[in-house]
Image (cartoon, rainbow, N blue to C red):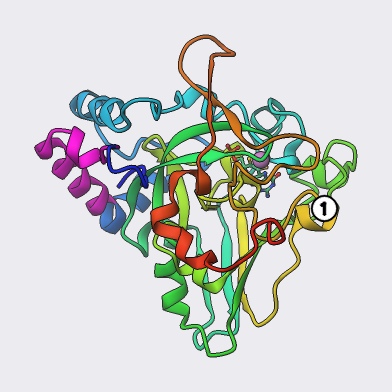
Amino acid sequence: MLIKSSKKSQLQEHQVTDEKIYQQRRTLLKSLGFVGASSLLAPVKANAAVDWFGDEKQTAKLRSLAFEKATPGLDKLTPEQKVISHNNFYEFGAQKNQPAELSQSFNVNPWQLTISGEVEKPLTLDYDDLFKRFTLEERIYRLRCVETWSMVIPWIGFSLASLIKQAQPNSKAKYVAFETLYDPKQMSGQSNRRLGGGIDYPYKEGLRLDEAMNELSFLSVGLYGKTLPPQNGAPIRLVVPWKYGFKSIKSIVSIKLTDQMPPTTWNILAPHEYGFYANVNPTVAHPRWSQARERRITSGGLFAQNRIDTQMYNGYGEEVAHMYKGMDLNKYY
Ligand SMILES: Nc1nc2c(c(=O)[nH]1)N[C@H]1C(S)=C(S)[C@@H](COP(=O)(O)O)O[C@H]1N2
Ligand SMILES: [Mo]
């Protein structure tokens, strides 16, 4: 499943990866989702990345083949080292290198994620449920930050829709509100206003219910075949690939179905700069900079990057444009 693109010319992973390898890998991930994950994870500290592909010797070749061939052309994967060292996670500092440095003792097990609000069946998931309750799959998505840098990341997780369906939204449910953990003892940016970039915590995000139920909306528990490192939002974070990165809220403890549009962190902080929708749109500039182009962080030296055109909906228009038909995208930015 792979980079979804409106360009028919762009190949999907199963078209470029040897079919047999692709199938083997699917089976592997699926079986880990059902049986392997928790027994593999249990004895290991949650913030130590765990290799879900088992025996390194047997699977290294398979894995690197899959990762290398996954994304042809400009959409080469961003190297793992860059994905886990260049981050926005203001709870651990507002500079790109700070989350990786200041989150290493972040304890994510035990964890509780509650699904509440306008639902028939409120749910609480504990740490093991995050890895066992749903069939895990890999999805390679572009991530476009509103600051104009971008990456291509192989996530592991499950669809947000599969979780919401289990909670059974009632007829009043129109929006979905998300919250990050509030724990100033562990998250130094929450107790130090300057380090935390002046945000009022907990970090909050939201989606319209139809956006949340879109097949692309994803809850990630891993990347590059391992559990999420803390700086990328362990143990579970949202990934909404057609929206600016700030919508993809990290380290989630609450998902609440609501009848009103929920308040969201960046919109509260600067409403003229950051809207509720925040769909990637090269034709609507941020008040202080253009969104027409982006810096794709690639392999190569520390600052290697390709300057490329930004695509409408980050290239996922075929899957999502119908949700915004008739809306004035200059108004609903
Ligand atoms: N809780 C929380 N979630 C967050 C952020 C944050 O500061 N706090 N930053 C957002 C922004 S601006 C981006 S671009 C992405 C970055 O995700 P990455 O570090 O995994 O690349 O996380 C988003 N999720
Ligand atoms: Mo961002």
4 left or right of 219 in image:
left
Q: Identify the image quadrant of the C terminus.
A: bottom right
Toward which corner of the image does residue 14 lie, by quadrant? top left
In the image as oriented, which residue stretches furthest toward the top?
A: 301
Which region is colored magenta?
A: 10-32
| Residue 142 visible (yes or no) | yes
Residue 208: percent from the left, percent from the top?
58, 70
| Residue 202 visible (yes or no) | no
Q: Residue at x 58, y 45 (%)?
A: 233
Seen from the viewer's position, the closer of residues 171 and 83 is: 171
- Relative vertical location of residue 205 with respect to residue 314 in this rendering, above or below: below
Q: Residues within 10 Å of mark 1 (few under 14, many from 20)?
A: few
Q: Is residue 26 magenta?
A: yes
Q: Residue at x 62, y 44 (%)?
A: 283
Q: Residue at x 42, y 76 (%)?
A: 165
Toward which corner of the image does residue 209 lie, by quadrant? bottom right
Instruction: Check disc 1 and report the residue beneath it.
Output: 272
